[in-house]
Amino acid sequence: MSYLGVGVSPGNVPVYHGSDLKVVDRRVRVAELILRSVICGLALVAAVLVATDTQVKEIFTVRKEAKFTDMKSLEFLVVANGIAAAYSLIHIVRCVVGMIRGSVVLNKALAWVIFSGDQVMAYMTVAAVGAAAQSAAFAKLGEAELQWMKICVMYDKFCNQVGEGIGSSVIVCVSMVMVSGLSAFSLFRLYGGGNKRGRKTSAAW
């Protein structure tokens, strides 16, 4: 069944045909390009903010420098953001080239690779932000039962800059989840189209 050029699969997944497919693909490409640009920019900002953050305090004539390598969760956050920025840059180039050529991606193998990569990146950014946020909470609030002191009382500048990096990472994380949703749509609509063609072939026989 179709309505205004849009077919409906048994699973109620919209199936687009002909020129409609090109219009939808163009809109998806534009949305993907915007999101991946946001991810690339903010992931780079977050990595730089956290990686360059240092503060020196003198405690009883002992100088102690706080840096991101003191916490494994912050190291993970920097690495995850760096990977996310590089990964998004590659896909920005792919999107721009595709938009210039005006081509519609119908290759299921490529769609699966993009979908799988986006899923891995989404899970990685979620894990990195979650771990960093938990560590930041302990540094800010401390833990009386474990006798963990409030580190941010002494290293306020360090904590503020780390907080800015985590805030940028949260936006990166949300954008990455949205991108993975777009790649899922781009993948599964190909199978919706295949089902439609399959039903037409069966009807002809």
Image (cartoon, rainbow, N blue to C red):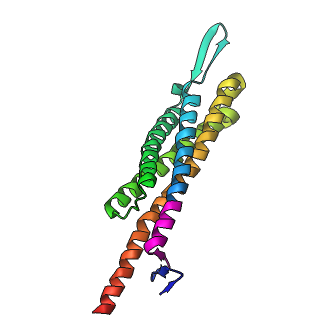
Q: Please provide percent x and percent y for residue 196.
A: 39, 81
Q: Is residue 149 visible?
A: no
Q: Position of residue 112 (x, y in %)?
A: 36, 60
Residue beneath the point at 72% across and 26% down: 153
For this orientation, the residue located farthest to the left is: 205
Residue 83 appears left or right of 161: left
Q: Is residue 168 above or below residue 147?
A: below
Q: Residue at x 46, y 59 (%)?
A: 183
Q: Is residue 66 visible?
A: yes
Queried whether the magenta region covers residue 62, the answer comes back as: no
Magenta residues, start to end? 12-27
Q: Which quadrant holds residue 74?
A: top right
Q: Quadrant of residue 103?
A: bottom left
Q: Assign the C terminus to one quadrant of the image.
A: bottom left
Q: Look at the picture and state if 167 lies above or below 1.
A: above
Q: Percent from the top left, x then y, of residue 192?
A: 41, 75
Q: Nearer the viewer, residue 194 or 76?
A: 194
Q: How many marks?
A: 0
> Is 15 part of what is drawn in magenta?
yes
Q: Residue at x 50, y 80 (%)?
A: 5
Q: Nearer the viewer, residue 94 or 165?
A: 94
Viewer-closest of 152 and 10: 10
- The spot of residue 52 in percent (x, y) is 56, 24
Kindly give the residue lying farthest to the top in the view shown.
61
Main SS, magenta residues: helix
